[in-house]
Image (cartoon, rainbow, N blue to C red):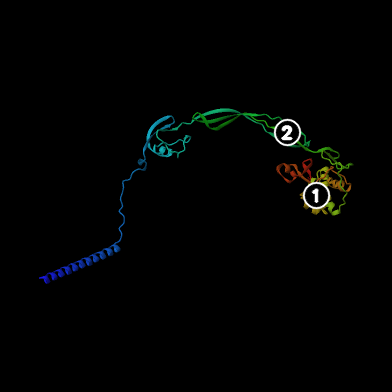
Amino acid sequence: MMILKYRNRQILILTLIALTTTICLSNQRVLAKTENEIQTVKSSPPVQIDYPVTNEFLLKPLIKIIVDYHGIEKKYEVPYGSVGNTLRRLGIELAENDVLPFDKDDFIFPNQTISIPEIETKERKENEIIKFSTQFLSSDDLLDGETEVVQQGQDGLKTVTYKEEYFNGCLWHKYPLATETVLPVKNEIIKVGTQNIIEDKNAASKNDKTVLLKTKTDDESFTLPKISLSEHDRDLLERLLTGEFGSSFTGAALVAQAIKCAIVYDNYTSMESLISGMGYVGSTNIGKTQNAVDAAKFIFDENGLAVKHRLFYMCTEDYYNSSPGNFHSTQNFILQYENVKFFDRW
């Protein structure tokens, strides 16, 4: 009886062990299958959820404001936002000359009054004085430094019609619309002397004086040495004097003295090099006037002077006046003879 109980207990134990093993193996197969499926199953895309569309500004709290447009007030309830967006939502468009006393990016606040006042326009006429100006005219009729009033100046008068715009009672803009001349202006005209010649001792082709002209700038100690010319240089000189100022003996003598100064002070040794170096433009391919011949003789052979001062450069009055800042204007003005100005170096 005891042996039977023992065997039954062994059978029970073995049965329990077999059952446990079967369960474990089954669990392992299930786990292996589950792990294998997790590794091989593809992920699904996220589910799209459609929310109802809602106007953005309706999500903001409504606040009460007042809009005063050109004196007409209206009350509104609008979402919190900028002044510019608020006006657009209310359909309020500013006129071309409207003035908004706010920045459009400023934010509105509860119970605010946005005031857009109407611009008041007026037309007004004003009388205005037209100041006369002074016009200066160079004149070789007067000595250098002398002036003469040719015409007295008189102010004019005009009526100007203005368009004025007022903002909050204050002048905002002012535009001229029309101008009417009531009294024309009369400018002052003053002649300014450019002539340095005090005395023209000999304007004829024949003379017995050693100095032709007396000027305010005379240098009483000024002299030039006597210079002899070759026949070639004399011929070229006389032709050049004819081309530069052959219509006048005194004018040709002034040019001849400037040429002599260039020879003495700049050491020119031929007329060709002097003409090129000093920039003379008078033609030498022409005949000779008697004035030019006499002037060359007076300055070079008789060692006379046109004026007691150094001379180097010359130009016409028209060129001088039409070219402000030209080279000659930087030099030392000595005198003007007829329409030609003569200069020394500084």
Q: Amino acid at mark 2?
A: Ile
Tell me which residue sits at (76%, 33%) in the image: 147
- Residue under circle 1? 240
Q: CA distance from mark 1 to mark 2?
A: 37 Å
The front one of 271 and 232 is: 271
Q: Give the answer, above or below, for where 182 lies relative to 198.
A: above
Which numbered disc, 1 or 2, marks the residue that appears first in the sequence?
2
Q: Is residue 171 visible?
A: yes
Q: Residues within 10 Å of mark 2 (few under 14, many from 20)?
A: some
Tell me which residue sits at (75%, 42%) in the image: 317
Q: What is the x, y in percent for residue 104?
A: 45, 39
- Mark number, residue 190: 2
- Mark number, residue 318: none
Q: Is disc 1 placed on a helix, strand or loop? A: helix
Direction front: furthest residue: 2
The front one of 30 and 62 is: 30
Would residue 28 appear left or right of 2 to someone viewing this image?
right
Q: What is the x, y in percent for residue 34?
A: 26, 63
The total of numbered circles placed on residues is 2
Q: Amino acid at mark 1?
A: Leu
- Between disc 1 and disc 2, the foreground one is 2
Tell me which residue sits at (72%, 35%) in the image: 136
When asked about the image quadrant of residue 159, the answer is top right
Q: Is residue 203 visible?
A: no
Q: What is the x, y in percent for residue 132?
A: 66, 31
Q: What is the x, y in percent for residue 126?
A: 58, 28
Q: Residues within 10 Å of mark 1 (few under 14, many from 20)?
A: many
